[in-house]
């Protein structure tokens, strides 16, 4: 997993998660991917206005970088829908590994606007800054709790031991198999 101060995640937005999973595992050797449905989380904001976004996501590693594949599953206003409508599928956001409040202050001071924000059920804050004018993508900030870092470590372990062929897509519930 990438160290503090580096890019830890690349997110690809897609209209068809299953096709994206096939491409990233078969053609690019990333994975295995752990897939789950994300329901509408309370308190989501789209450019400061309440919204309701549900999605299906898959997380898997490629070397030390986490790959997120994301398909929005409802019609809520979001930067995911905006991106797909304007550009089609592709690299949507990157996520640096850093301290949430300090990174938020730095991006805000640079004049970037928060396009999407919310809170995970376990309390971690997240947001997407609209930095498309500079790099063509958004920048995600996420509070990385010890539990979340633990899950990422298990995904990295699954990647390190994966044969790049068998069982490339798994439900998130199977992540616990790597805890031993």
Image: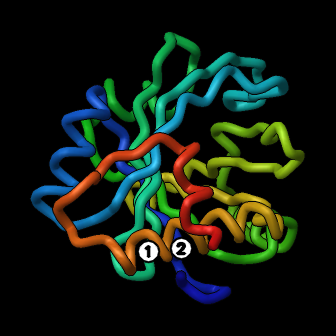
CB contact under 8 Å: marks 1 and 2: yes
Q: Helix, strand, or loop for circle 2?
A: strand
Report the side of 69 relative to 39 (left or right).
Answer: left
**Residue at figure coordinates x 71%, y 69% from the top left:** 150
| Front residue of 48 and 26 | 26
Q: Specify whether residue 137 is in view.
A: yes
The residue identified by callout 2 is 8
Q: Residue furthest left?
A: 27
Count up the numbered dots.
Answer: 2
Residue 119 on image: x %, y %: 81, 40
| Front residue of 64 and 45 | 64
Rendered image: mark on residue 65? 1
* 50 over 12 or under it: above or below: above
Report the side of 78 relative to 73 (left or right).
Answer: right
* 92 over 164 or under it: above or below: above
Mark 2: few/some/many CA within 10 Å (<14, 14-19, 20+): some
**Residue at figure coordinates x 58%, y 43% from the top left:** 173
Q: Helix, strand, or loop for circle 1?
A: strand
Q: Specify whether residue 88 is in view.
A: no
Mark 1: few/some/many CA within 10 Å (<14, 14-19, 20+): some
| Front residue of 11 and 161 | 161
- Specify the quadrant of the image occupied by residue 3: bottom right
Q: Residue furthest top?
A: 75
**Residue at figure coordinates x 68%, y 59% from the top left:** 141
Residue 140 on image: x %, y %: 61, 56
Residue 108 on image: x %, y %: 76, 60
Q: Earlier in the sequence, mark 1 or mark 2?
A: 2
Report the side of 159 relative to 155 (left or right).
Answer: left
* 81 over 105 or under it: above or below: above
């Amino acid at each position: 997993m990438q160290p503090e101060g580096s890019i830890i995640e690349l997110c690809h937005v897609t209209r068809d998660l299953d096709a994206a999973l096939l491409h990233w595992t078969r053609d690019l050797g990333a994975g295995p991917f752990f897939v789950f449905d994300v329901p509408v989380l309370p308190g989501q904001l789209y450019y400061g206005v309440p919204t309701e976004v549900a999605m299906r996501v898959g997380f898997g590693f490629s070397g030390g970088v986490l790959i997120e594949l994301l398909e929005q599953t409802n019609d809520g206003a979001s930067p995911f829908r905006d991106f797909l409508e304007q550009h089609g599928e592709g690299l949507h956001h990157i996520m640096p590994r850093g301290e949430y409040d300090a990174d938020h202050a730095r991006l805000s001071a640079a004049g970037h606007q928060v396009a999407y924000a919310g809170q995970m059920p376990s309390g971690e804050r997240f947001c997407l800054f609209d930095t498309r004018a500079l790099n063509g993508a958004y920048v995600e900030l996420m509070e990385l709790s010890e539990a979340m870092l633990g899950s990422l470590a298990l995904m990295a372990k699954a990647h390190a031991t994966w044969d790049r062929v068998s069982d490339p897509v798994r439900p998130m519930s199977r992540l616990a198999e790597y805890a031993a």
